[in-house]
Amino acid sequence: MEIKSVILAAGKGTRMKSNTPKVLHKIMEKPLLGYVLDNVKDIVNEAYVIVGHHAEEVTDYVNSNYSFAKTVLQSPQLGTGHAVSMVCPYLANFDGLAIILCGDTPLITESTLKKFIEYHISCGSDLTVMSTIFDNPTNYGRIIREDDNSLKCIVEEKDATAEQKAVNEVNAGIYCLNWKKIKPAFSQLTSNNAQGEYYLTDIISWGKNQNLKVNAYILENNEEIYGINSRANLAEATRIMNTRKLTSLMENGVTIVDPSSTWISEDTEIGNDTIIYPSTYIEGKNKIGSNCKIGPCAHLRGGVEIADNCKIGNFVEVKKAKIDHNTNAGHLSYIGDSEIGANVNIGAGTITANYNPLTKVKSKTILKDNVKIGSNTVLVAPVEVQEGANIGAGSVITKTIPQWALALTRAPLRIIEGWVKKNS
Ligand code: UD1
Ligand code: CA
């Protein structure tokens, strides 16, 4: 069956107190919305992202990163039900499943979404809502059930009676719809509630009244539906995401010396027997091989590919670089926009000067196999050091260095005997 997704991302996110739209706030350099889109990209053939506040910025992000997704403008924003109704013209003849998600809920996983859809299909449901249990359900919509335990409706915190507020099964904000059957609901929702909004949650009672099959899928791990509404939520979600990543890396044979000071993005792959030393921060999309040593205090900023048996030591920053096997950059270096061969040694304090602030152009540094770079070298890009060449310590390299040559720009050493005594 064809599956499409609708992702709600038009809301204001008032509590972030930010000029950046909420769904573009980042966890380890990836926007919240990116996590949601990545989770559905292998499940659906198309996603509609509902945009409103800062629509242009969100649209730019979606268009430049996700070809399977398109944005649909909701203006003004009259509630979650109104948001979904924006896709009706696009899905007029669609007869498959629609998965509705929120752009501010980045911790949901692809495997949970797959189980959720399987559950919907195996129950023969027309509408399935994901729910979970919270000790403190405050602010979430409550799942209200009939005496026979079947679903009745969802009541928002602001509309709930004291008795309803005591219910701790909550609406995760994730739905699976047999689109054709539920679609008529969107022209029939009303805003007759405490917030004066068209609530998406009202499709549950609507479905019941139409004698459609309405079910809830109870998610055990309530962490996955943690929503971001504030900076504190963002920090907490980052922590949860990181713990998840470190745990999975350790299970796959990576040593993390100190999980409490190590940050590794979801999109970083690391081979077994690699050791990550404390205070290392790895953001964005990276691939690190086996038997590497990273850190302490290394910073990988995305677009980094490191082959096996490499060492990236303390206070080394790497961005957009491909590094072949057995290569070492042990201390205090910056490696950006680079292609580095095998068996290369990069001395302490080596800098690739990749950025020209006048032209704002970034250029590439290429170091071929077996190159040795002496300490405190500046490689002014674009520049290439050919195979096996050596660079003397303290050099500034601005031209191609031919293979097996020695290059150095060091000023000659002068020794003036007795100078100190004579001048004191
Ligand atoms: C919503 C649910 C609540 C559920 C909770 C789970 C409703 C009425 N309530 O509440 O039952 O427990 O999510 O997190 O659906 N949005 C739009 N357009 C709008 C309004 C909102 O796109 O007009 C987007 C927001 O950007 C956000 C999502 O919809 O991504 C949810 O909206 P939000 O206001 O955060 O709803 P909650 O109060 O959290
Ligand atoms: Ca929310």
Image: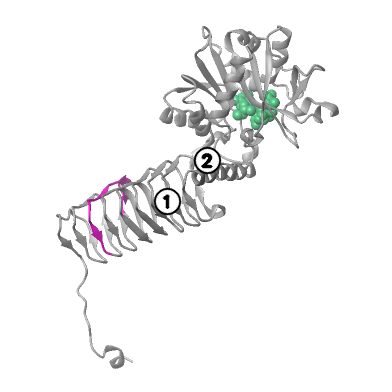
- Quarter of the rendered structure image containing ligand 1: top right
Give the percent coordinates (x, y) of residue 98: 56, 17
Q: Quadrant of residue 237?
A: top right
Whether disc 2's CB lies below 8 Å from ligand 1 is answered no
Looking at the rendered structure, which numbered label has been put on residue 229? none
Residue depicted at x 58% and y 24%: 115
Q: Nearest the camera: 33 or 266?
A: 266
Give the percent coordinates (x, y) of residue 400: 17, 53
Query: Is label 2 or label 1 in front?
Result: 1
**Which SS class for mark 1?**
loop
Give the percent coordinates (x, y) of residue 39: 51, 29
Q: CA distance from mark 2 to mark 1?
A: 27 Å
Amino acid at the residue labelled 1: Thr
Residue 411 placement, left or right of 229: left
Asked if residue 102 lies in the magenta stretch, the reply is no
Q: Earlier in the sequence, mark 2 or mark 1?
A: 2
Q: Nearest the camera: 72 or 375?
A: 375
Amino acid at the residue labelled 2: Lys
Camera sees residue 27: yes
Asked if residue 355 lies in the magenta stretch, the reply is yes
Report the magenta residues as a range: 353-374
Q: Which residue is mark 2?
A: 26
Camera sees residue 8: no
**Which SS class for mark 2?**
strand
Whether disc 1's CB lies below 8 Å from ligand 1 is answered no
Looking at the rendered structure, which numbered label has been put on residue 274? 1
Residue 336 placement, left or right of 160: left
Q: Quadrant of residue 20?
A: top right
Give the percent coordinates (x, y) of residue 123: 64, 14
Residue 77 placement, left or right of 275: right
Q: Quadrant of residue 13?
A: top right
Q: Quadrant of the C terminus?
A: bottom left
